Image (tube, grey):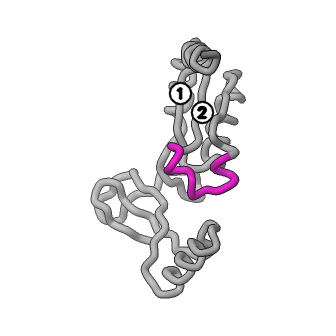
Amino acid sequence: MTEILHKELSESIFKLIGIYQYSSEAIIFKGKLESEGIEVFMRDNNTVDANPMYSNAIGGVKLFVRNEDFIEGSRIISQISTYSLNEENQLIKCPKCGVEQINMVTSINDLKSLLSFVFSLLIVVIPFYSKHKYKCNKCKFEFN
C-alpha cells in the first residue's frame, strides 16, 4: 500500500523530461538544467552504469524535474543540439544533400570490428573497437 502511495506521490510531484541510452548522456543534460537553477533527479543510472547492456531492457536513464520546472526545463533542453558539430561548433552538413541533421554512428563493416563486437558480448563489456562514421538523417548517406 505504501509503495503505491509513494509512486502516486512521486508521479504527481515530478515529471519525466528525458530518457537517455547511457548515464553520460543524461549527465550532460542534467548539468545544463542544474546550471540554469532547475533541480534534476536521475533514475536507473546506477543500473545502466553497472551493466550498459541493461539500458534497453529498463528503458534507459531517466531524468525528472519538478512539475513547476517542466516547461522551463523543456525549453532549456530544446536549445541543446542533438546533431553532430564540427571543430568550429557548427552543425555538420551532409556532403550528398546538404542537410544539417548528421549523427555519429558506429558500424561493424570489417572482420576486426565484428570479432571485437562478438568478443565484447562474450565477456559482457562495451565493444572496445568500432569504426565511427557520420550518417545523414534525411538521405541516410554515411561518410567519414
Marks 2 and 1, how far apart at CA:
6 Å
Residue 18 locus on image (x, y percent): 53, 34
Q: Tell me the residue at 49%/81% (across/down).
A: 114
Tell me, yes or no, if residue 78 can be seen here.
Answer: yes
- Magenta segment: 47-59
* Residue drawn 55% across the image and 50% down it: 55
- The reply to whether dot 2 and dot 1 touch (C-beta < 8 Å) is yes
Q: Is residue 61 left or right of residue 94?
A: right
The number of numbered discs placed on residues in the rendered structure image is 2
Looking at marks 2 and 1 on the same chain, the residue that comes earlier in the sequence is marked by: 1
**Would residue 7 be found to the left or right of residue 103 on screen?**
right
Amino acid found under the numbered disc labelled 2: Leu
Q: Where is 123 relative to 71, above or below? A: below
Relative vertical location of residue 131 with respect to residue 9 in this rendering, above or below: below
* Residue at horizontal 51 percent and vertical 70 percent from the top: 132
Mark linked to residue 63 = 2
Residue 46 locus on image (x, y percent): 70, 45
| Secondary element type, mark 1 | strand
Provide residue 91's location: percent of width, then percent of height. 48, 51
Name the residue furthest front.
1
User: Mark 1 highlights which residue?
Assistant: 16
Query: Is 117 included in the stretch rendered in magenta?
Result: no
Instruction: Give the amino acid at mark 1.
Output: Leu
